[in-house]
Amino acid sequence: MRIISRQKAIYFFITLGVCLIAAAVALNVSWIILNWRAGLMLFFGGILFLVIIAGLVLNTIFLVREIRRNEQHDSFINAVTHELKTPIASIRLYLQTLQRLEVGEAQRRQFYELMLLDTERLLHTVEQVLKAGEAAQKKSPPQRLPVEFNSLVRECMELARVRHHLQAADLDYRESPSSSMANGDGARVLGDPEELRTAVSNLLDNAVKYSPDGVHISVELDAPDEKRVVLRVRDQGVGIPEQELKRIFKRFYRVTHRSLAQVKGTGLGLFIVRSIARKHGGQVFAESEGAGKGTTVTLELPRRLA
């Protein structure tokens, strides 16, 4: 209901802006026709006309952007509230059960394990918010250290298997045999290991999150030339509509397609990936054939030869 009301507000301001522009055009054109002999007045009238039109256009654009930004902020707050409230409520329930009831040792251990998982979920949400704030502030460039990117990717994949309880076959890793890595040069990049680990982990978490019907993720590492290292994370999940592919890397942005309504998140993961990629002189982009056809997210980083 809230989304519909905001869309109506956007349409209202667009319609209002168009009507004001049309009225300004009609008034100024009629004024010019009636006073076409007064050359000086015609000149100043034309200037005033352009100023009014530009002001109306800018005002309409500003209002629409503010409405959309507020909508994204509201969605972010709702998502973060859910991501924080759900594990807290779960932990509280387990603690109340342990306090009020006598439970066996096996069940007690199970409760402890579930509470640890909930605390990891809480910590992950807080870290995402903090890292997004750091990325938005654009502080000093990251520390530059040589990083074996292929080893880092394998570590992140193992962490994703443990975090999401995945089988070995759910995450497939391979290095392109045609790349220069086959010559023993490796896939070394220069950058901050922790930030690069965050970027790769976010790509994997995002692929798992948008694969609700079964996780089948292919991770491919390639070094097509002496300048680039390319990581492709391909899932067979819900896919992304074409018009959304460039927007998903914006802060707070979440795809509003109805097939993704049940997917929870803060809208910060891919924004953080893009910020880290840019800080390291690289880029990230997404490809998808449409809803239900999976998504491929590609991360490119400058290569540092051994």
Image (cartoon, rainbow, N blue to C red):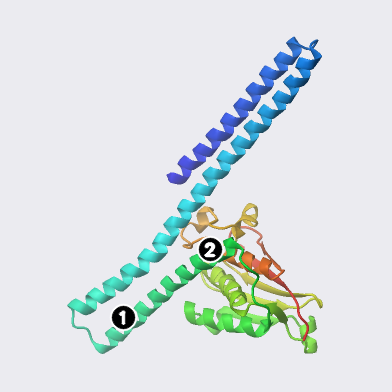
Q: Amino acid at mark 2?
A: Gly
Return the residue nearer the eye: 212 or 191: 191
Label at residue 133: 2
| Residue 235 position by quadrant | bottom right
Q: Which residue lies at the image location 58% right of the left edge and 34% below the top edge?
A: 14
The kind of residue on which mark 1 rests is Phe
Q: On the picture, is 188 further left or further right than 18?
A: right
Q: Is residue 257 visible?
A: yes
| Badge 1: residue crowd in 10 Å (few <14, some 14–19, many ≥20) | some
Query: Quadrant where the C terminus lies?
Result: bottom right
Residue 289: x and y in percent read 66, 60
x, y percent for residue 138: 61, 63
Q: Nearer the viewer, residue 51 or 4?
A: 51
Question: Pointer 1: what residue?
Answer: 111
Q: Quadrant of the N terminus?
A: top left
Residue 39: name its quadrant.
top right
Q: Tell me if residue 59 comes above or below residue 19 in the rendering.
A: below
**Can you say whether 276 is above or below 116 in the image?**
above
| Helix, strand or loop for disc 2 | helix
Label 1 or label 2, whichever comes before in sequence order: 1
Percent position of residue 47, x then y: 74, 25
